[in-house]
Image (tube, rainbow, N blue to C red):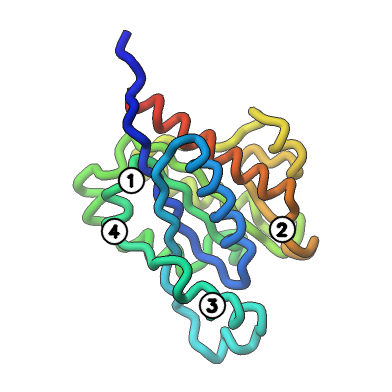
Amino acid sequence: MSAMSTTAPKIAVVYYSATGNVHQLAKALAEGAEKAGAEVRLRRVPELAPDAAIDSNPAWRAHVDAIADEVPVATLDDLSWADAYAFGSPTRYGNIASQLKQFIDSTGGLWQQGTFHDKPFTGFASAHNAHGGNESTLLALYNTAHHWGSLIVSPGFTDGSVYAAGGNPYGTVHVGSSGEVADSTLEAARYQGERLAKLAQKLAA
């Protein structure tokens, strides 16, 4: 039996966030992965919405301005670099946001090269209402992992933090109408990142 690899797994946390909720989840997930020994790249995809749409929502404008210099923009190199992936998106009519979808749609060359084969993949999301599409958004996101040949690593009911955050086995989610992202939800996201990192480490052994 081979010894477990001591090389830190490399994880790309890639997300889109309009008003900051998914951003908070992404940061917490990255923290959990780093705590488990992973090297993490936290990356946002480019904003595609016109200024008129962004300016119509003060929270959206505030978040866009706040992260402009805080979080680097995702590139295909980040995906080539990574051993595992965590993707996050707000819900848009039960699906992922177009901003994240456009980035995913640019990965055809990497897909043809087999870059994503056998790499762990997990997802997280946010919707305004409790039944506003969080689960369908995660399931839609996981369609990408199926096509990539990646290995879906959902949190399942494998830790108490999942139950404390509302019990979503597909991935950590936030309900926007409940207000700020709760500490229990952030803790579930950290656990999700830790789980992803540990499984990536095992696969590298």
Secondary element at tag 1: loop
Percent of width and height locating residue 185 = 70, 48
Label 4–label 3 contact, CB within 8 A: no
Q: Residues within 10 Å of mark 4 (few under 14, many from 20)?
A: few
Amino acid carrying label 4: it is Leu
The CA span between labels 2 and 1 is: 27 Å
Asked whether residue 137 is in view, the answer is: no
Other-residue count near label 1 (Cα within 10 Å), few / some / many at <14 / 14–19 / ≥20: many
Query: Could you tell whether 137 is left or right of 182 in the image?
Result: left
Residue sitting at x 49%, y 86%: 50
Q: Front-most of 52 and 84? A: 84
What's the mark number on residue 71?
Answer: none
Q: CA distance from mark 2 to mark 4?
A: 29 Å
SS at mark 2 in the image: loop
Q: Which residue is mark 2?
A: 181
Give the mark, 3 or 1, whose residue is nearer the N terminus: 3
Residue 82, which numbered label?
Answer: 1
Q: CA distance from mark 4 to mark 1?
A: 10 Å
Disc 2 residue type?
A: Val
Q: Which residue is mark 3?
A: 64
What is the quadrant of the N terminus in the image? top left
Mark 3 in CB contact with mark 1 (< 8 angstroms)? no
Which residue appears farthest toward the bottom when viewing the image?
52
Q: Position of residue 132 (x, y in %)?
A: 71, 59
Q: Which one is earlier in the sequence, the residue at label 4 or at label 3?
A: 3
Using the numbered discs, state the Cα–Cα distance from disc 3 to disc 1 in whole angstroms.
Answer: 26 Å
Q: Which residue is mark 4?
A: 76
